Image (cartoon, rainbow, N blue to C red):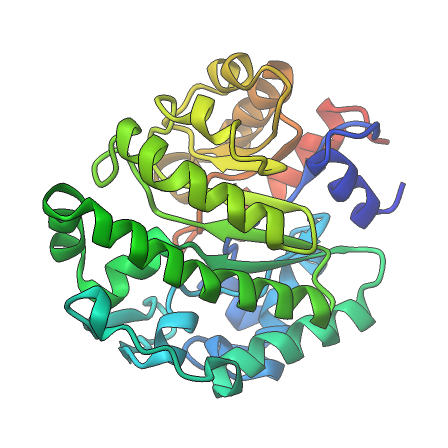
């Protein structure tokens, strides 16, 4: 089975040999930049630099999927937020909020923005160059976009004082998520990651249930490809709710025990990730990575990979070990 079909089958809970290997969020590192000759910040908005760096996931790491969107700021920048693009060893960040209330929302034709167009051009080039590898697009959900546009504290205050306005904001920003996602599918993406940072410290289980189940369900329904949801942190208290959204797959962190995640999901959604970033991948040895991979496979995960966007100084050998160990322990051949 080709890598693309393996990833799609695993995401959609269809028969496939062994486990897949990918990171549906960023695997880029400084070491990969040096090897591929493509560096941040240009790789965030230059399609050729983005292409060169993203294909390292297959060429250097031997993953079954390539995901070329490294930052969290593309949509927000395209709509008007000010951005510090960072340097080769730092990630971009939003530097100034754009709106105060729902009535301030003004969404221009963001698809004509150069950074958005770079993503689409890169995906098409990857699709043409790697037809047998899963090309994974990435967009951000309306909860995350609300942080960018309104400010984290200001938005979270609204969830308590004005929940009606929050529902309206999420409904409006959902259109950004869906539009960019489907543009990536049209450009050649086989799968879409929706990253929405509804972490435990910023979104209670009740808030996820009341605000995001309806929105996430609608997003999944409207995206024209299999969809992976990514949420950082300990999400054990909302996996049950995530399973109700209709998402095909959930990419989760090592703060959730792999066996516990499989138990809660109960086969309703495929599971991806779980290999620890800040300790194991960044600082430990390949043999430590192997132990975590073996545990994740034995627990029943469908696709093995880093738990989130990897730290920029993560050793290439540790990232590659995920693929080596997965293919060995899951008997892929």
Residue most extreme to the right: 1
Q: Is residue 65 left or right of residue 251?
A: right
Q: Quadrant of residue 60?
A: bottom right
Name the spot of residue 216 as percent of width and height, x first.
Answer: 47, 44
Q: Is residue 54 left or right of residue 307?
A: right
Where 233 sits versus 69, above or below?
A: above
Q: Quadrant of residue 49?
A: bottom right
Q: Quadrant of the N terminus?
A: top right
Name the spot of residue 331 as percent of width and height, x first.
Answer: 81, 24
Where 76 sits versus 64, above or below?
A: below
Q: Quadrant of residue 89?
A: bottom left
Q: Quadrant of the C terminus?
A: top right
Name the spot of residue 313 as percent of width and height, x first.
Answer: 40, 56
Using the image as rendered, state which of residue 48 and residue 321 is in the foreground: 48
The answer to whether residue 130 shows anywhere in this view is yes
Where 300 sits versus 207, above or below?
A: above
Name the spot of residue 234 as percent of width and height, x first.
Answer: 33, 29
The answer to whether residue 315 shows anywhere in this view is no
Q: Is residue 42 left or right of residue 97?
A: right
Q: Residue at x 22, y 54 (%)?
A: 165
Q: Residue at x 30, y 28 (%)?
A: 205
Q: Residue at x 25, y 70 (%)?
A: 94
> What is the count of numbered marks?
0
């Amino acid at each position: 089975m080709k890598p693309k079909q393996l990833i799609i089958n695993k995401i959609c809970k269809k028969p496939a040999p062994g486990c897949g290997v990918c990171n549906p969020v960023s695997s880029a590192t400084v070491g990969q930049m040096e090897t591929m000759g493509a560096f941040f910040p240009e790789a965030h908005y230059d399609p050729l630099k983005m292409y060169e760096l993203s294909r390292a996931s297959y060429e250097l790491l031997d993953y079954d999927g390539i995901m070329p969107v490294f930052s969290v700021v593309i949509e927000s920048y395209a709509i008007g937020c000010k951005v510090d693009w960072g340097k080769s060893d730092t990630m971009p960040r939003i530097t100034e909020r754009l709106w105060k209330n729902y009535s301030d929302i003004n969404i221009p034709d963001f698809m004509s923005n150069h950074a958005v167009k770079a993503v689409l051009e890169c995906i098409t080039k990857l699709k043409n160059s790697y037809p047998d590898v899963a090309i994974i697009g990435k967009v951000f959900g309306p909860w995350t976009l609300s942080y960018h546009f309104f400010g984290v504290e200001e938005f979270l205050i609204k969830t308590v004082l004005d929940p009606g306005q929050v529902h309206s904001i999420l409904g409006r920003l959902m259109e950004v998520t869906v539009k960019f996602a489907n543009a990536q599918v049209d450009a050649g993406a086989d799968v879409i990651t929706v990253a929405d940072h509804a972490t435990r410290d910023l979104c209670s289980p009740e808030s996820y249930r009341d605000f995001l189940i309806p929105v996430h369900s609608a997003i999944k329904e409207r995206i024209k490809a299999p969809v992976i949801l990514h949420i950082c942190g300990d999400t054990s208290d909302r996996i049950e709710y995530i399973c109700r959204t209709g998402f095909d797959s959930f990419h989760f962190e090592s703060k959730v025990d792999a066996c516990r995640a499989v138990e809660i999901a109960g086969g309703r959604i495929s599971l991806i990730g779980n290999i620890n970033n800040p300790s194991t991948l960044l600082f430990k040895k390949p043999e430590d990575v192997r132990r975590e991979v073996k545990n994740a496979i034995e627990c029943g995960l469908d696709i093995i990979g880093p738990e989130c966007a990897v730290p920029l100084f993560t050793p290439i050998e540790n990232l590659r070990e995920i693929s080596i160990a997965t293919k060995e322990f899951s008997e892929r051949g």
